[in-house]
Amino acid sequence: MSTVSAPTRLAPKNPIRWSNSRQGGRENALDSIKLGIIGLGTVGSGTVNVLARNADEIARRAGRPIRVASVAVRDLAKARSCATAGIHLTTDPYEVINDPSINIVAELIGGTTLARELVLAAIRRGKHVVTANKALVARHGNEIFAAAEKHRVIVGFEAAVAGGIPIIKAIREGLAGNRIEWLVGIINGTSNFILTEMRDKGRAFDDVLKEAQALGYAEADPTFDVEGIDAAHKLTILAAIAFGIPLQYESVYVEGITKLEAQDIVFARKLGYRIKHLGIARRGADGVELRVHPTLVPMRRIVANVDGVMNAVLVKGDAVGHTLYYGAGAGADPTGSAVVADIIDAVRALTVDPQHRVPHLAFQPSTLAGGVPILPMGQTETAYYLRLQAEDRPGVLADVTRILGDLEISIEAILQKAPSEDETHVPVILLTQRVQESAMDKAIAAIEALPAIRAPVTRIRMETLS
Ligand code: NAP
Ligand code: HSE
């Protein structure tokens, strides 16, 4: 008969108590893990509902039950979209964090000031943390992960990017053998929902945004969604774990969907494209491109057909080639799914030697490449859709093509709308081949200076995703 001794482990700060309820049995049952949640809105309620609905399956996966012990909210009287019986409710988040019996804290309030303080406080108290807060991770992640490593806890942030899609785990672990070359994503559900409804149903921007807010998709400040800030937060996180660089939100080029006009959606369709709001991260010889903007994508690409609140991330690795991840990008249950996955990871982490955990940003912290330059927008290269309001007379188009030709910008297609009787200026659409943004800036300035062109020229970037 052989005896099996327990492996030597570094003592976790919140040791799990083994119960003797099955003395003499083949296995020991563990006490349930006590979870504290701060915030019980869309994501908090979704998390509680998923934990309750799938409690048995989750316990089988985690190795022990997970119990929501304490939750902090702003307003105790507010009706909730989840059951709260048996949960201690408080308006003081520190009551949750300071409770020594709580092993894991989920920060689900949003924002970056209080959320940062709470997350750092929980880390200092030796608790594992789970957050859905992309703004927090993108802006303060370097500080938070350093603190987590110091205090030997993990900070899970799967729900921070692409809602229910397990994209962090896919890139950080599933693609760990690859050199990631680029990734492109529809990573804001609200913007994608708005663009889809405008295109398919001709609905007004503001009307669709209100619906996205009512459905719980939008951020507390929806300008984060429609001005591309939320997508930039997510792209910052994706780029860090894909390329092994520190989080650098300030270096992302950001453009939202608010300046898009319905006529551009129509012209794009006529030319075989759809306009999608994309986050793009690509590494080249000179540095990394990080940009978020509306983009024309050929209609035949899967990404062009990702509609509504759905998100998709296309990742190109040198070994695996292209991989595509698709799913709900926002909403209570899909985001709850991602939060719960992190909670289960945190439960498992309670008994794992901290030195052998998956690094927060996929690469060992000491190997993060801080010196890799993020390219200024002028140095990035892409194809373009240009819409000009041109005077309807001979020679105007020749002037425009001469400007482009002088800057070695090749034209792929031209579309000109026939003028109606009272129109003096007509829209002219030009699709160009790939060129450096700095050359296109010069071309647009020269075109706008032509007397026959009414400024401004509309520019939308194009990607073939091939
Ligand atoms: P939400 O619906 O507005 O919920 C926020 C919750 O935080 C509310 O329950 C609120 O309490 C509570 N809260 C706010 N300040 C508080 C304070 N000082 N003390 C205690 N509780 C406080 O927001 P959400 O949509 O769930 O988003 C939460 C986080 O998840 C954000 O970081 C967001 O970016 C992220 N996220 C959201 C989604 C989504 O689909 N909505 C998806 C992925 C990630 P009351 O209810 O009492 O007001
Ligand atoms: N407001 C975000 C979105 C929530 O619409 O994508 C999910 O991160």
Image (cartoon, helix red, strand yellow):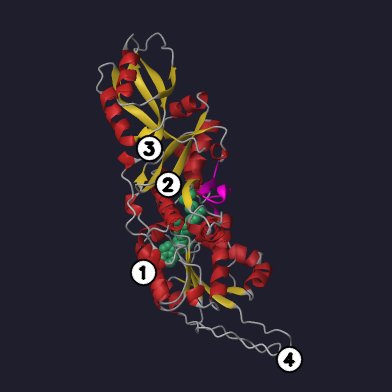
Q: Residue 282 carries which label?
A: 2
Q: Position of residue 350 (x, y in %)?
A: 54, 77
Q: In which quadrant will I find the N terminus? A: bottom right
Q: Is residue 300 left or right of 237 when viewed as pictured? A: right
Q: Mark 3 points at which residue?
A: 381
- In front: 427, or 5? 5
SS under mark 4? loop
Distance from the alpha carbon under mark 4 to that under mark 1: 46 Å
Q: Residues within 10 Å of mark 1 (few under 14, many from 20)?
A: few
Q: Where is residue 308 in the image (x, y as percent from the top left)?
A: 55, 42
Position of residue 206 measured from the top left corner of the image (x, y, whole percent): 44, 38
Q: Residues within 10 Å of mark 2 (few under 14, many from 20)?
A: many
**Magenta part of the protein: which range?**
308-331
Residue 433 located left or right of residue 54: left
Q: How crowded is mark 3: few (under 14 residues within 10 Å), some or many (20 or more)?
A: some
Secondary structure of the residue carrying tag 3 is strand
Residue type, mark 3 in image: Glu
Judge whether residue 30 is colored magenta: no
Quarter occupied by residue 22:
bottom right
Q: In this view, does 220 lie to the left or right of 338?
A: left
Badge 4 is on which residue?
A: 24
